[in-house]
Amino acid sequence: MSTAGRKDDHIRINLEEDVEFKQLTTGLERYHFTHQALPEIDLAEVDASVLLFGKRLCAPILVSSMTGGTERAGLFNRRLAEAVQSKRLAMGVGSQRAALEDSEAEASFSVRAYAPDALVFANLGAVQLNYGYTVDQCRRAVELVEADALILHLNPLQEVLQPEGDSRWGGLLARIEQVCVQVGVPVIAKEVGWGISEQAARGLIDAGISAIDMAGAGGTSWSEVEKHRAPTGRQRRLAAAFREWGIPTATSLALVQAARAEAGRPDLPVFASGGIRSGQDIAKAAALGADLVGLAAPFLRKAVESTASVVEEIDLLIEELRISMFASGSRNIEELRRPGVLVSKTDLVQVPTPLSHRATRTSPSERGKGRTKEGLAYASEDVAPPISDLSARSNAEGLDEFASQWLPRIEEEMRAVLTTRHPLLAYHYAMMHYHMGWADESLRPNAISAGKRIRPLLCLISCAAVGGDPACALPAAAAVEILHNFSLVHDDIEDGDETRRHRPTLWTLWGVPQAINVGDGMFALAYAALLRSQVNSSTGVLPAPAEGSSWALTAFDRFTEICIGLTEGQHLDLSFEEREEVTVAEYLRMIEGKTAALIAGSLALGALFGGAGYRKSECMHRFGHNIGMAFQIQDDILGIWGDPEVTGKPAGNDILRRKKSLPLLYGLEHPTLGGRIRSLWKRGATEEDLPEAIALLDRSNAKNWSEEQASRYHSEGTQALQEGLAATADCSLLLEVAGRLLHRRS
């Protein structure tokens, strides 16, 4: 098929078929603007204009490269150009290969006559440089549209999915560098819809690229487009397999910015495109640092109608953008990027700590002053049951009161440990702050998503329960939470997870080597946090040694046991991924280390720091072990039967991920239904298979059995607690935590 014919196919399919991503999203939905009831500006003051390549645009909007090469495409380009000219925006034409191959197609790209003042980008497929195209063809493409810059688009996956595609991509970067040096205009590297990684961005920046359009995943799936073009069943199947492939737009934007920062090129323009559908999306992308925001599908549909329809669409987008700026108190794009203007979704449901608790150190006798009822419920990502649903309302209030008092001091203690030793090391510690939820993806200080903080709270509550001052246990609380986060950094690498707490993981932003090093640093600093107890900055007081033993060595030994348990559990978890057969008993042994060890150790350390003897400390450990097991089993239940509206994940998500969770392993061992469940499991259950898979697990009694196991562990934990503490001890907060963990819904 000719190049022009292929482009006609692309237009037709985009207009007539459903080719959007079904599961993968842009990631922009994770962010929201902080509404300002008193913006202190007038709407008329809002200026959305930007300066790029020497031209002033009325808004950071790019009518992305779409089409050309045919008479119909030429009509669309003319309408787009007329609209862009009227609104002083930027536009790119589609790939000009058709015009370079056939002079009759040149007219379809002639947009300059209709947009004499607009910022216009020429466009060629970068891979053509490996098929004989030279700098001369690149210059010719620029001349045809009298362009201000040249886009070299990158589409390796699309090319290999096309029957007529170009698959020779080796050595391309050197040829791109040659074009950058010789073509005479700025060169923009642009993906077509699967995103640009940090590694790719670094290579492009080194090659001399003048701007990067990362064009992430979440909008049009070009794999799906090519599926509709595929001439054979085999090719359709291959294309369908990659429908959900790619780096989400928000993630890719952060990756490219990280590469830009590492290269010392903060001035390098970065464009965001891929799934941008509204003025608020444009505002979010701009707030996240995009210098220009590209849209294609919304404009293509309007170009089918008329120039006026395109203009109307642009007007609506700009107005929505300006209103977003106004309602967030931002006069211009720079103000839109201020810390706190755009926040992650989880921040909007967190209740700030009362000011009285942020700066003061209160003693146990002062608890109850300035309490925040929702403290624990919203300081974590675990959405606890509504307080009105809990059997002991006073316990719930007491727990939230305790959390509101001590969570800020835990954060303060951890920050004191995770502090740079030298200005040269600031980047290293800033990455730790990002993971901890204290910085955004540009490493600017910001409260993003602090994580659950369950373990350090348990440590302090345990200390109080044995009669100690929780302030004495702050070093231990900080240590267990830093250790927990070290394990998460490494888990994300080992599991290949790209997001955590609704944000890109460390390794996706800064690469595996840096993430490993950050994790290693946090592991060492966890011990440093624990050793701060020898000179406790909070009280200067330590409990007496436990039953004549060395207090510091006992704490050190307990902490080392936690570390060993974590790594043993992770070893089993990783090995299970390589095994087809895993028993229920083996799985329970794995979560003893991976989940229960840290919760149990947190409680034992808290008791130790509270001055408890060996027996009480061991009972706390048993209590923690059991509620840790119940916690993980409840997590497994939610991974299959959880409400998507609460968990934020699709129903049956663990089945789709082929996760070996407890209910599934129980179902696989069922004497009559296990074979059918195994058949679905082995071939990989799809969304269409989910109802059948969940029904089979229900019939096998997997959910009820798992709930019974969680309840059993919970009961054994509370029994251990009651055995270990005297009748006069106050166990209410520990029992409340155990109940919340068991009955949580996310």
Image: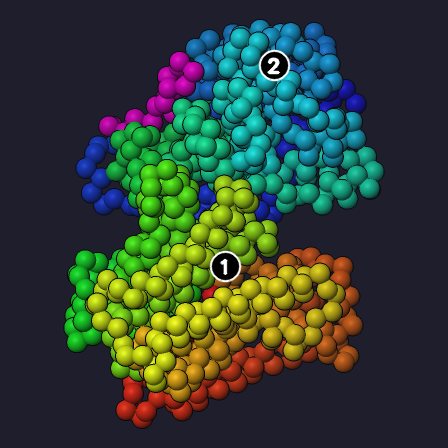
Residue span colored magenta? 44-61
Q: Does 369 appear above or below 207?
A: below
Q: Quadrant of residue 380?
A: bottom left
Does residue 263 appear in this view? yes
Between label 1 and label 2, give the one nearer the viewer.
1
Q: Is residue 573 left or right of residue 611?
A: right
Q: Is residue 178 left or right of residue 544?
A: right
Name which residue lies at 35% across and 88% down.
Answer: 725
Q: Does 717 appear above or below 203?
A: below
- Residue 247 counted in the magenta span: no
Disc on res. 178: 2
Circles 1 and 2 in contact, beta carbons < 8 Å: no
Q: Does 585 appear above or below 61?
A: below
From the viewer's side, name the closer residue of 173 and 609. Answer: 609
Does residue 698 appear in this view? no
- Mark 1 crowdedness (10 Å alpha carbons): few <14, some 14-19, many ≥20: many
